[in-house]
Image: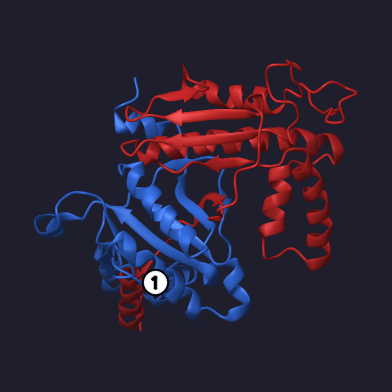
């Protein structure tokens, strides 16, 4: 009888961890497929505005990124809180954009160069003056295909958030 | 086994990110020194955003929620007379003589101030592109029974076959000719 009684008093058996590796591997493969490697650390705040009439940029190999926004946390002391341009990993001046674009285009395979698109990732609180200067620089090097990169969402929320409209 | 997998999982979580890759595509105008083409005043819609993010259309203050309606009314006006050679037979607008003559001749000029917020600018761009898309969708539904925006996303998708793409491109060209996107971003002075 002891045999049976010990079984009954044993309480809840421990959860089997045999399937744990399978679950973790599944998660691993999920993240490997849906994410991409970060190629640069952001040094600027980058809260993009919302838009609804958007198009997807399907091919990553022909996109050149330009980040614009206020310097983040620890950089404010050194660089101030005015919006700055970030190219690759460092802050840059408006006049550096032309060389940067040509440099990036030079690294692309030749057949892709006519399709090079400049993705402007601009923080929503930035003023249009800086953007206009950037656009002017882009026109100088004849990089005319641009994309105002945004989030997919309600576009009128943009104005509510700036707190200036009405 | 699970430990190694966890290690790899954490590595991928830290070094990768899910990127946003959507946005509004624009084509900047090339720098040229030739004098601008003459456009009649009635064929130009002046949209201006000032430092306070207020929108002025042809110097009248308007609300952002009305902008799309105003733009569509302007583009779709088709004010040219039937015998003038520029008559727009597919337009459904008011055909007022004081507004645009033909979608092919109408231009939207968007200007901003240095202190205009980028968010407001994007909202306005979005509404203007939305107006074009709405008109193009209307024509596309009438001619082919599909939305123009759907055709466009199918065309851009890498899964679509070459034959299908060529076919789509032909249809899209026709719609684009009916409502060409003539949207110019003026330089800040």
Position of A89 with respect to B124 (left or right) is left
Give the class, few, some or many, for how many residues have Cα within 10 Å of label 1's Cα (few <14, many ≥20). few
Question: What colour do you see for chain B?
Answer: red
Residue A165 appears at what percent x and percent y?
34, 24
Q: Position of residue A93 (x, y in %)?
A: 28, 62
- Can you give x and y, in whole percent of width and height, for residue A33 in the image? 49, 70
To which chain does the residue with label 1 belong? Answer: A
Tell me, yes or no, if residue B115 can be seen here. Answer: yes
User: Toward the viewer: A95 or B103?
Assistant: A95
Instruction: Locate residue A76 relative to residue A27 in the image: left or right.
Output: left
In the rendered image, the vertical position of residue B38 relative to residue A131, given as above or below = above
What is the tally of numbered marks visible in this picture?
1
Residue situated furthest right in the rendering: B83
Q: Which chain is blue?
A: A
Query: Looking at the image, which residue is at 38% across and 39% down?
Result: B119
Q: Residue at horizontal 40%, vertical 41%?
A: B188
Callout 1: SS = helix
**Tell me, what colour scheme is on the image?**
by chain
For the N terminus of chain A, give its image quadrant: bottom left
Task: Pick whichever, B121 or B16, lies toward us.
Answer: B121
Q: Nearer the viewer, residue A23 or B160?
A: B160
- Tell me if I can see residue A34 in this picture: no
Identity of the residue drawn at 31% across and 44% down: A126
Q: Residue at x 15, y 59 (%)?
A: A75
Quadrant where the image shows the C terminus of chain A: top left
Mark 1, residue position:
A99
- Indicate the position of residue B6 as horizontal and vertical percent values: 32, 76
In this view, A82 is above or below B107: below
The residue closer to the viewer here, A37 or A42, is: A42
Vertical arrangement, residue A51 with respect to residue B59, above or below = below
């Amino acid at each position: 009888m002891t045999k049976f009684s010990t079984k009954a008093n044993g309480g809840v058996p421990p959860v089997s961890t045999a399937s744990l590796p399978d679950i973790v591997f599944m998660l691993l493969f999920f993240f490997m497929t849906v994410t991409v490697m970060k190629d640069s650390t952001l040094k600027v705040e980058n809260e993009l505005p919302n838009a609804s009439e958007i198009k997807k940029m399907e091919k990553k190999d022909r996109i050149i990124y330009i980040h614009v926004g206020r310097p983040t946390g620890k950089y404010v002391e050194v660089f101030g809180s005015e919006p700055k341009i970030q190219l690759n990993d460092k802050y840059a001046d408006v006049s550096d954009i032309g060389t940067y674009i040509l440099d990036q285009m030079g690294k692309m395979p030749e057949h892709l160069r006519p399709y090079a698109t400049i993705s402007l990732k601009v923080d929503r609180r930035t003023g249009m003056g800086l953007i206009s200067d950037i656009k002017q620089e882009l026109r100088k090097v004849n990089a005319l295909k641009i994309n105002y990169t945004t989030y997919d969402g309600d576009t009128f929320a943009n104005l509510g958030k700036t707190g200036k409209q009405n | 086994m699970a430990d190694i997998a966890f290690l790899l999982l954490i590595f991928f979580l830290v070094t990768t990110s899910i990127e946003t890759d959507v946005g509004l595509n624009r084509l900047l105008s090339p720098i040229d020194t030739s004098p601008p083409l003459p456009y009649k005043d009635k064929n130009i819609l002046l949209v201006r955003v000032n430092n306070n993010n207020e929108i002025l259309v042809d110097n009248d203050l308007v609300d952002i929620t009305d902008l799309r309606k105003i733009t569509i009314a302007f583009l779709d006006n088709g004010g040219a007379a039937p015998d003038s050679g520029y008559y727009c037979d597919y337009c459904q607008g008011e055909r007022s003589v004081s507004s645009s003559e033909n979608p092919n001749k109408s231009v939207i000029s968007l200007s901003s101030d240095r202190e205009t917020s980028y968010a407001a600018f994007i909202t306005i761009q979005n509404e203007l592109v939305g107006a074009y898309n709405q008109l193009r969708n209307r024509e596309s539904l009438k001619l082919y029974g599909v939305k123009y925006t759907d055709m466009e996303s199918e065309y851009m998708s890498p899964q679509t076959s070459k034959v299908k793409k060529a076919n789509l491109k032909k249809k899209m060209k026709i719609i684009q000719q009916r409502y060409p996107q003539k949207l110019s971003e003026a330089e800040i002075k």
